[in-house]
């Protein structure tokens, strides 16, 4: 209303250039929105729900589907099931396409299909172990102890043995799923605490990561409170 009256009064006297009036208009809308419109939305948590729904609409509209990071690994009935179908699926599928399949294809004509599968499987676990060693090196800046690689090599060998035992005994004897599940999860937990976690805990990487995450949350929280406080 005020704008219209001012326009009428100054119509023949003063008229701002379109660029200037446009910047003033957009700036006024943004400032008042962050001062009055968004604070109650942020305080009530509606923004999080709305963002989640928008993401869902975009994914459905473009027929996109996000792959879950894991598939209930605690329900694994074997090491093969754990590593191949349930744990860290994005990395599993990446290693399958970049390491396992190429190595298996390259060796099938050389050593035969059975040994090609074994070598490809072990190579995949070795590469995974080396990737983790490199990642931990960048976090800790400490020379690798190779315990993490040992963890993955051990699991690769155990998966190979497990598959061989399954093939040998598949028509003779089979453990109930409940029992094999407990043995699988128990083996993963024990070997993880024996080989995977010690170098992380020993070098304090876990504490640094938690501190940095907490710092980020506190920083974002303080900035949001400070920003909203400007308009109160």
Image (cartoon, rainbow, N blue to C red):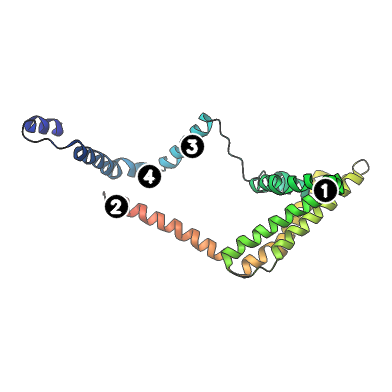
| Residue 166, percent from left and from top | 87, 46
Question: Dividing the picture into quarters, in which one does residue 197 lie?
Answer: bottom right
| Residue 198, percent from left and from top | 67, 66
- The quadrant of the picture occupied by the N terminus is top left
Disc 3: which residue: 55
Q: Are marks 2 and 1 in contact (CB under 8 Å)?
A: no
In the drawing, what numbered circle is on residue 81? none
Q: Are marks 4 and 1 in contact (CB under 8 Å)?
A: no
Cα gap from disc 3 to disc 1, whole angstroms: 43 Å
Q: Earlier in the sequence, mark 2 or mark 3?
A: 3
| Residue 115, percent from left and from top | 85, 49
- SS assignment at label 3: helix
Q: Earlier in the sequence, mark 2 or mark 1?
A: 1
Disc 1: which residue: 116
Cα gap from disc 4 to disc 1, whole angstroms: 56 Å
In the drawing, what numbered circle is on residue 229? 2
Q: Is residue 217 left or right of residue 179?
A: left
Q: Nearer the viewer, residue 115 or 202?
A: 115
| Residue 55, percent from left and from top | 49, 37
- SS assignment at label 4: helix
Disc 4: which residue: 42
Question: In this rendering, does residue 118 appear at all?
Answer: yes
Q: Mark 3, mark 4: which one is toward the viewer?
A: 3
Q: Is residue 132 left or right of residue 219?
A: right
Q: Nearer the viewer, residue 70 or 14?
A: 14
Q: Mark 4, mark 1: which one is toward the viewer?
A: 1
Cα gap from disc 2 to disc 4, whole angstroms: 13 Å
Q: Mark 2, mark 1: which one is toward the viewer?
A: 1
Q: Are marks 2 and 3 in contact (CB under 8 Å)?
A: no
């Amino acid at each position: 209303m005020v704008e219209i009256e001012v326009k009428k009064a100054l119509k023949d006297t003063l008229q701002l250039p379109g660029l200037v009036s446009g910047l003033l208009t957009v700036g006024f809308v943004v400032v008042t929105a962050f001062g009055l419109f968004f604070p109650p939305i942020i305080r009530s948590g509606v923004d999080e729900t709305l963002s989640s729904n928008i993401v869902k609409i975009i994914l459905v509209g473009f027929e996109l589907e996000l792959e879950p990071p894991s598939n209930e690994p605690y329900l694994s009935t074997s090491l093969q099931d754990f590593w191949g179908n349930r744990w860290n699926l994005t990395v599993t599928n990446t290693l399958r396409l970049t390491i396992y399949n190429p190595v298996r294809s390259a060796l099938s004509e050389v050593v035969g299909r059975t040994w090609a599968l074994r070598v490809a499987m072990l190579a995949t676990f070795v590469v995974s172990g080396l990737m983790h060693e490199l990642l931990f090196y960048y976090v800790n800046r400490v020379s690798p102890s190779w315990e993490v690689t040992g963890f993955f090599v051990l699991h690769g060998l155990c998966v190979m043995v497990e598959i061989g035992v399954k093939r040998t005994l598949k028509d003779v004897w089979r453990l109930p799923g409940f029992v094999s599940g407990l043995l699988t999860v128990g083996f993963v937990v024990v070997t993880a605490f024996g080989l995977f976690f010690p170098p992380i805990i020993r070098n304090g990487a876990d504490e640094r990561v938690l501190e940095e995450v907490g710092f980020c949350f506190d920083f974002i929280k303080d900035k949001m409170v400070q920003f909203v406080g400007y308009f109160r």
